[in-house]
Amino acid sequence: MPAYVNFVVAGFLTGAVYGLMALGLSVIFGVVRIVNFAHGEMMVLGMYGTIMLNQYLGLDPLLCAPLDAAVLFGLGFALQRGLINRYIMRPEHEQFILMLGIATLLTSSMLMGFGPDARNVQPDYALDSYELGSLVLDKVRVFAAAGAFVSVGLLWGFFRFTRTGKAIRACADNQVGAQVVGLDVKRLYAVTFGIGAACVGAAGTFMLLLVDVQPYLAGDYTLLSFIIVIIGGLGSMPGALLGGLLIGVSEGLSAYLITPSLKSLISFGLLIVVLLIRPEGLLGRRA
Amino acid sequence: MRIPGGGRTALALALLAAALLVLPFFVGNYVLSVLVVFLFAAYLGQCWNIMMGFAGLLSLGHALYAGLGAYVSAALYVRFGVPPWFGLIAGVAVAAVAGAGIAALSFRFGVTGVYFALLTIAFDEFTRILFDHFDWVGGSAGLFLPVKTLTHSDVWQLRGSPAMFYYLLLALSAAVLVLSRTLLDRRIGYYWLAIREDQAAAQSLGIDVFRYKMAAVILSAALTAVAGALQAFYDNNLYPDTIFTTARSVEIITGPVIGGVGTLFGPIVGAFVLTTLGEAMTVAGSYFGVPGLKQWFYGAALVIIVLLQPSGLWPWIRRSLRLGEDAR
């Protein structure tokens, strides 16, 4: 089997986690119409949350995912309820400055709380791998991807089958209509922001299995999330997942074929091409 | 030029100008260096404001234009010994062409709003990674300008004391202030405001929307590149990861947003507030030995200002000082 297959498969698995991360951004934008410039910051917060739980409670990182998601849900809910709801109708640059302020607060708080050094978790299966013929899969990568896919499945079920999920979709389709039939739109927005934050919190846990964390990573993850949702289609759930997988594979391949430091060049290049040729993204609906 | 309405405004402006002109004689090197940082921020904010404040085009990638001005002028100087001012003109030209290219692509393909903003980030980050691997200008290891010990300032070689840069930037900032005011009073200014408020309506009135949006981007990009070139010769070192980073674009836009988007004095007020605040926090941070304290207060200040004065500090100050509608 050619060597690049390993890189493609590893990229695909990492891409699943990217997809979950970007899904959070996409859900928030699709419903609340706010671009969450603090998305990467929430991701990194999720990563530090896992480190804390792992260090002090000795929990396996995978078990931290639901707890992390719950904490981030609370944070997202409170943020939307307390601050962002007032800015729904304001111009974009004001929303942007608000989100930027929140992002700066989060990053600097983490810098003060956890220090600038890179940190990680070491579960006992950290160095294990599955071998299928000549295909070698890191165990952590498989677990992370599985976790991401399960989370996406749960989210899909929530939006498809629960009353709240359906109400949120109604808000996204027609905000005024939703208000007319008596939905508490502001509360649903807060729930949505919470769900978006929970996604990225869980994604942070899974990502921590694959990389070290440090506060300054936040900006990179924010940009990466933007790339993915634009490529997949801003506001589209399957689009975010597809975009994540695509970027994961493209990063894996360009790291192998060209050089690792150029992997984001390809991603930004893809973003520019998609924005110009199909601004609504691969799976997005034309506005 | 007509002095903006009423004696109050004229007096305030004259006092401010006089104070800024004599300030370098009364302050030490440290304060002077902070003032240079302030003027860089004010001027860059004014340039960004032409695009966003007047024509309503949200650019989150202005580091690209400043960076191109910096890299082109510095590389020509280091590699070929091209005099700084010629290099500056070349840098301005490159930035204008880059702006024109990005704008033409976006507007022809109908990329607007959030998508346009994200596209500007993408082009800037793309360039950052390219320069990281562009060995002719030093790659990620950086490009350095030779530092000479000087007995006197040489404006022609852009070599000299912070005071020289202070006056250069002060002149630039004043020039853009006058330019912005003049443009706003002319046809192009009214067209920009019409496009900003409602592009479809502007188009239906027969305004060549594409042309005037292009003009805003090219002007903004070119003026931004001037500051980039000066910054290169002021700092004497260039790294793609500090020059082209999105964090720098964000720095450029926070001043005018805090001060008041679309106003003439807002970018200057915003830059002053943020520079002072940032400097105070740096001092406090090192005093208490807490890294990140500066950014924390910076973030808190952004949230508080946008909560209390969402349309910026300048409109509020203007009302409080009763400066009249003309002191935009």
Image (spheres, grey):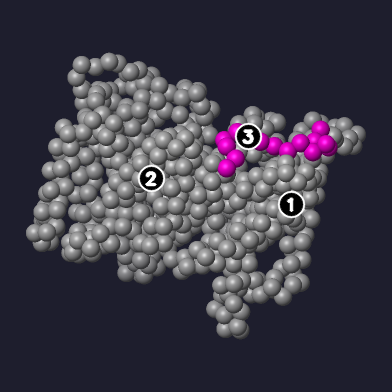
**Whether marks 3 and 1 lie on the same chain:** yes
Q: Is residue A124 magenta?
A: yes
- Name which residue lies at 19% across and 49% down: B178
Look at the image and give the residue range highlighted in magenta.
Answer: A113-127
Pointer 2 residue: B252
Please name the amino acid that badge 1 sits on. Ala
Please name the amino acid that badge 2 sits on. Ile
Above or below, B161 relative to A169: above
Question: For numbered disc 1, what is the local secondary structure?
Answer: helix
Pointer 3 residue: A118
Pointer 1 residue: A65
- Name which residue lies at 54% across and 46% down: A109
Using a 10 Å C-alpha cutoff, classify the residue at mark 2 as few (fewer than 14 neighbours), some (14 to 19) or many (20 or more).
Answer: many
Question: For numbered disc 3, what is the local secondary structure?
Answer: loop
Q: Where is residue A208 drawn, in percent x and y?
A: 70, 42
Judging from the image, mark 2 belongs to the subunit labelled B
Judging from the image, mark 1 belongs to the subunit labelled A
Using a 10 Å C-alpha cutoff, classify the residue at mark 1 as few (fewer than 14 neighbours), some (14 to 19) or many (20 or more).
Answer: many
Furthest toward the left, the residue is B7
Furthest toward the front, the residue is B288
Q: Along the horizontal axis of the image, is B152 left or right of A139?
A: left
